[in-house]
Image: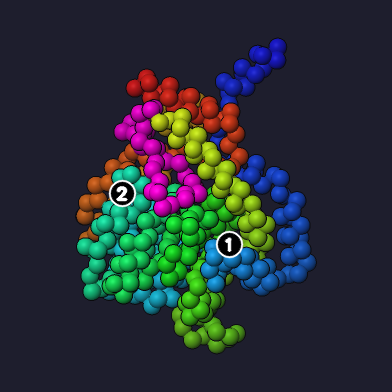
Amino acid sequence: MSNRILKSVSLDMQVPFMDLAALHAPIQGEIERQISRLASSSSFVLGPAVERFENHFAEYCEVEHAIGCNSGTSAVHMALRALDIGPGDEVITVSHTFVGTVWGILYCGATPVFADIDAQTMNMDVSQVEALITDRTRVILPVHLYGQPVDMAPLQELAQRYGLYLVEDAAQAHGARYRGKCAGSLGDMACFSFYPGKNLGAWGEAGAVVTSNPEFAERLHRIRDHGQPERYRHTELGFNYRMDAIQAAVLDVKLRYLNAWNRSRQEKASIYNETLIDAGLVLPEVIKDADSVWHLYVVRHEQRDHIAAELQTAGISTGLHYPIPVHKQDVLSDLEVSRASFPVTESVGKQCLSLPLHPCLDDVQQAHVCEKLMKILESL
Ligand SMILES: *Cc1c(COP(=O)(O)O)cnc(C)c1O
């Protein structure tokens, strides 16, 4: 009897791509107490809760300042505004990213210039960057995609030599490290998203820019809050990008668990690496200088769509990050770059498949994913 139940459970096992309810269950009471304190204080926008989280997050990233805002997309926009990026300026980034990276550039009226990605890491191919620098280039904007820091030393050297700014898109890399230094502390500024599914996620929309430069910090404070250095005095074009205090309260609780959650992701990534080594997939690689926090575990295969459909039939949800490169999006079709070719970017877009990987994925579920996946691959 009990055997039969066990068997039917394993046959019907559902493996969700993410499980935020399970992640939050043990800390829900703690978070709700903070939200209820906030309700009594009626300080809902910026204020003490936001400042507390900003201080803790800056400390976490090993930088001087964190400026909380309402999304990662706004964070990229704010960072580029703080550098006075505008029409005619060029920003070097990658096309294999979430579109939010590129919105910030377009909102400034500047021109995105793309480097192709490296076939092993799927991160910016830093060896291509120097050839892309022109007299209009102002910023290099690497994206620490899937939780792995980009190889920053060559970019730091180029930024120094050509007098460019270096802004990290660290929206997927909270707590990742490069040569021992925290993502967010590797350039002039770094942009984070706290969208609910990120390694550190709010209960709604939120983001932040971090920096150790006091002048950038001051500009960022002004830009996110209507361009006002003090109330009702508006000295530059500002935005309403302020951080919601409820999100800050949630994030401040969750920040205490981030390292443990990241370690859990790293352990599960090692299990995938070991189990799938001979399965016939291209597995993600991490450079020796980087400690990835495995926001996503992305494998590649030419028959990606078929594999994803078969996994879905078996109750296993997967994701696509990202199937259409940014330079191929309709919104960029007027730009010359939409007709350029980035072979690795384009092939990764067609082949990438994100497997379930989150702190609450248990061993039985992960073994089930590996077993089904290997069975599907054998039958191809
Ligand atoms: C999530 C994400 C963003 C945008 O953040 P939002 O908070 O969703 O606006 C930007 N860049 C990357 C790489 C992201 O993953």
- Name which of mark 1 and mark 2 comes first in the sequence: 1
Up-down: is 112 above or below 310? below
* Quadrant position of the N terminus in the picture: top right
Q: Are marks 1 and 2 in contact (CB under 8 Å)?
A: no
Q: Decide which of 329, 353 is in the foreground and name it.
A: 353
Q: Provide the major secondary structure of the magenta segment.
A: loop
Q: Residues within 10 Å of mark 2 (few under 14, many from 20)?
A: some
Amino acid residing under circle 2: Asp
State the SS at label 1.
Answer: helix
Give, as a three-letter code, the residue at label 1.
Answer: Tyr
Q: Is residue 53 left or right of residue 126?
A: right
Mark 1 is surrounded, within 10 Å at the Cα level, by few (under 14), some (14 to 19) or many (20 or more) other residues, namely some
Classify residue 19 by image quadrant. top right
Residue 124, quarter of picture: bottom left
Residue 176, percent across and down? Answer: 49, 54
Q: Position of residue 136 (x, y in %)?
A: 25, 73
Q: What stretch is highlighted in magenta?
A: 278-305
**Residue occupying the point 49% across, 46% down:** 294
Q: Residue 76, image x and y in percent?
A: 44, 65
SS at badge 2: loop
The structure residue drawn at horizontal position 64% and vertical position 44%, both measured from the top left corner, is: 23
Q: In which quarter of the image is the C terminus?
A: top left
In the depicted view, which residue is nearer to us: 279 or 71? 279
Q: Name the disc covering residue 60, or none.
A: 1
Would residue 184 be visible to someone looking at this image?
yes
Residue position for label 2:
118
Q: Where is residue 108 in the image (x, y as percent from the top left)?
A: 37, 71
In the figure, 174 relative to 64: above or below? Answer: above
> Residue at left 35%, top 28%?
280
